Image (cartoon, rainbow, N blue to C red):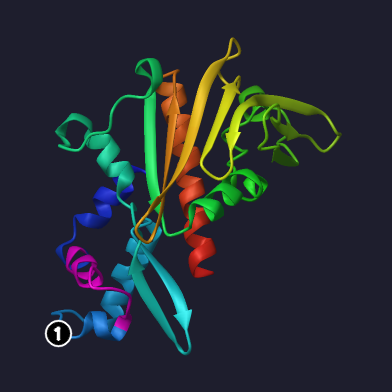
Amino acid sequence: MTYDTILTALADPTRRAVLDRLRGGPMAVGRIADGMPVSRPAVSQHLKILLDAGLVSVQGKGTRNLYALVPGGAAPLGDWLGDLRADRPAPGPAGGLQRSLTTRLTPAEAWKLFCDDIAIWWPVARVSLSACSDGALPQGVTLDPAEGGILREVLFDGTQGDWARVTRAVVPEQLTLDWRLGTPDGSVVALAFAAEPGGSRLTLTHDADDGDTAAMWDTVLDRFAAAANSSLSNF
């Protein structure tokens, strides 16, 4: 999600109160609404906005839906705050950009989603050679996550376009790419999957840092986070 979507969601004091209640763990809407100065239907509407902002997830359990905080759900807002953050991460390689997010997936599950299941979630309509050239959108995206493997798009007529080549792969911890999409002379993208309590953190660095690459990775990681949350909640 974008930082402005998160800011809008957090602007309402009731929604902030809902998030505070969920700090204690997953809850059904009735328990969340208990004692609040608004009705249960109103709380449900607030939860929908928080879901759309990527701040909470929902999972069915029996006849109830349990809502929970999404670890790292506010990461885009933290990235946007930049120098105002006391815990601002170090710059990426060679002064490039860095992005990170947390998920309740294990590092192995996050690796599989990013690499093996990339065709399910990658935003081809906005991030692909075809999108840049106003051509037909790709039929799919494939990534061979092994040294020498290729990240490419495949069109319906069988035409292929290569975006990157894998230069290092340590399953399920590190993936380094010789990146060409948007940087035809080459650049370096590095992905790290690290275990954290309750899940894992994905950190992406790119040694090319400009408005286009920043917007590209914000779009890609928004979609990855949404796919990760969906795989957790079946929502």
Left or right, 196 with respect to 89, comes to right
Pick out the residue farthest to the front: 170
Left or right, 72 with respect to 224, comes to left
Left or right, 227 with respect to 38, comes to right
Secondary structure found at label 1 = loop
Pick out the residue farthest to the right: 157
The percent coordinates of residue 54 (x first, y second) are 38, 56
In the picture shown, does residue 213 fall above or below 121?
above
Residue 235 appearing in the image? no
Give the amino acid type for the residue marked by disc 1 in the picture.
Gly
Which region shows up in magenta?
A: 16-29
The percent coordinates of residue 10 (x first, y second) are 22, 56
Q: Quadrant of residue 83?
A: top left
The percent coordinates of residue 62 (x first, y second) are 48, 88
Q: Nearer the viewer, residue 128 or 169?
A: 169
Q: Residue at x 19, y 63 (%)?
A: 16
In the picture shown, does residue 117 fall above or below 64?
above
Q: How many numbered marks, from 0 up? A: 1
On whether residue 235 falls in the magenta region, the answer is no
Pick out the residue farthest to the top: 185
Q: Which residue was labeled with disc 1?
A: 35
The percent coordinates of residue 55 (x first, y second) are 33, 58
Q: Nearer the viewer, residue 93 or 129?
A: 93
Please rate how many residues cluster around mark 1, counting C-alpha atoms within 10 Å: few if below 14, some from 14 to 19, many from 20: few
Q: Residue at x 51, y 26 (%)?
A: 189
In the picture shown, does residue 29 fall above or below 92?
below
Left or right, 76 with respect to 113, comes to left
On whether residue 17 falls in the magenta region, the answer is yes
Residue 14 appearing in the image? yes
Q: Nearer the viewer, residue 232 or 30?
A: 232
